Image: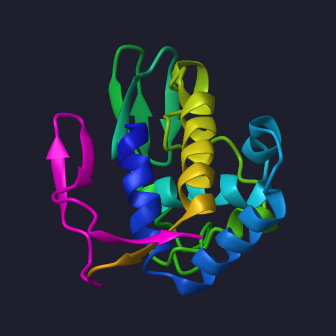
């Protein structure tokens, strides 16, 4: 799933010149820094997070109710199953103005609550690899884009396909390598 997240980040960055330029400026400023410093960079983390927000890899997570719970007109009992829709939360315009636009800066402007940003699920059963996935994504983005230039080969919207429980690009993310930076 981390590789799918990276494919999404490359797709969105190379179709958003302002975000790509800011990413490259950020990387220029981080040149020569240890990976631990690069991994904590707010903009690079925002790019990784926004990619997963715009296009969640896991569209929903199931949970089992453990104690009686009422939500609006619905009353749930222990043992009932519910589906939390990651896609619906991440496309909520009240939480994310222009929800289908790729805007990493939203993660610099606001700290989202644990139930507002859930690409790794949430609560006690949140994906144990969440922090590692973001860390790896930032390091790969920095290593790849810090030293190399690419361009998108098309501007087509990404086709999505289901891969068991996950969603991802149906095809490769077509980029052309332009050489070193």
Q: Where is residue 65 shown, x and y percent of the image?
A: 44, 21
Is 102 in front, or is 119?
Answer: 102
Q: Where is residue 62 shown, x and y percent of the image?
A: 35, 29
Question: Is residue 176 on the magenta stretch?
Answer: yes
Q: Is residue 118 visible?
A: yes
- In this rendering, the answer to whether 37 lies above or below 25 is above
- In this rendering, the answer to whether 65 lies above or below 166 is above
- In this rendering, the answer to whether 81 lies above or below 33 is above
Residue at 46% x, 70% y is 179
Give the position of the N terminus as an image quadrant: top left
Is 111 in front, or is 33?
Answer: 33
Give the position of the C terminus as an image quadrant: bottom right
Query: Dividing the picture into quarters, in which one does residue 17 lie?
Result: bottom right
Q: Where is residue 19 shown, x and y percent of the image?
A: 61, 77
Residue at 49% x, 78% y is 101
- Magenta range is 154-181
Taking the image as shown, residue 109 lies to the left or right of residue 60, namely right
Q: Is residue 57 visible?
A: no
Residue at 16% x, 59% y is 171
Query: Dividing the picture into quarters, in which one does residue 78 lie?
Result: top left
Question: Is residue 160 on the magenta stretch?
Answer: yes
Is 127 in front, or is 10?
Answer: 10
Query: Dividing the picture into quarters, in which one does residue 147 lie?
Result: bottom right
Is 66 in front, or is 161?
Answer: 161
Residue at 43% x, 80% y is 15
Q: Where is residue 169 shown, x and y percent of the image?
A: 24, 57
Q: How is the image coloured?
A: rainbow
Number of on-image labels: 0
Taking the image as shown, residue 40 lies to the left or right of residue 148, namely right
Taking the image as shown, residue 36 lies to the left or right of residue 160, namely right
């Amino acid at each position: 799933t981390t590789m799918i997240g990276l494919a999404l980040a490359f797709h969105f960055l190379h179709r958003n010149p302002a975000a790509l330029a800011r990413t490259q400026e950020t990387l220029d400023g981080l040149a020569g820094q240890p990976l631990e410093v690069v991994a904590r960079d707010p903009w690079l983390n925002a790019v990784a997070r926004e990619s997963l927000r715009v296009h969640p890899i896991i569209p929903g997570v199931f949970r089992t109710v453990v104690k009686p719970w009422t939500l609006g007109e619905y009353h749930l009992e222990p043992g009932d199953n519910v589906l939390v829709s990651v896609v619906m939360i991440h496309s909520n315009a009240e939480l994310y103005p222009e929800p289908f636009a790729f805007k990493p800066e939203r993660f610099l402007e606001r700290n989202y609550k644990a139930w507002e940003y859930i690409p790794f699920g949430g609560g006690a059963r949140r994906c144990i690899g969440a922090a590692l996935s973001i860390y790896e994504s930032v390091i790969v983005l920095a290593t790849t884009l810090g030293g190399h230039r690419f361009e998108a080969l098309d501007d087509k919207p990404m086709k999505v396909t289901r891969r068991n429980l996950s969603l991802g690009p149906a095809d490769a993310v077509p980029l052309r390598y332009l050489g070193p930076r």
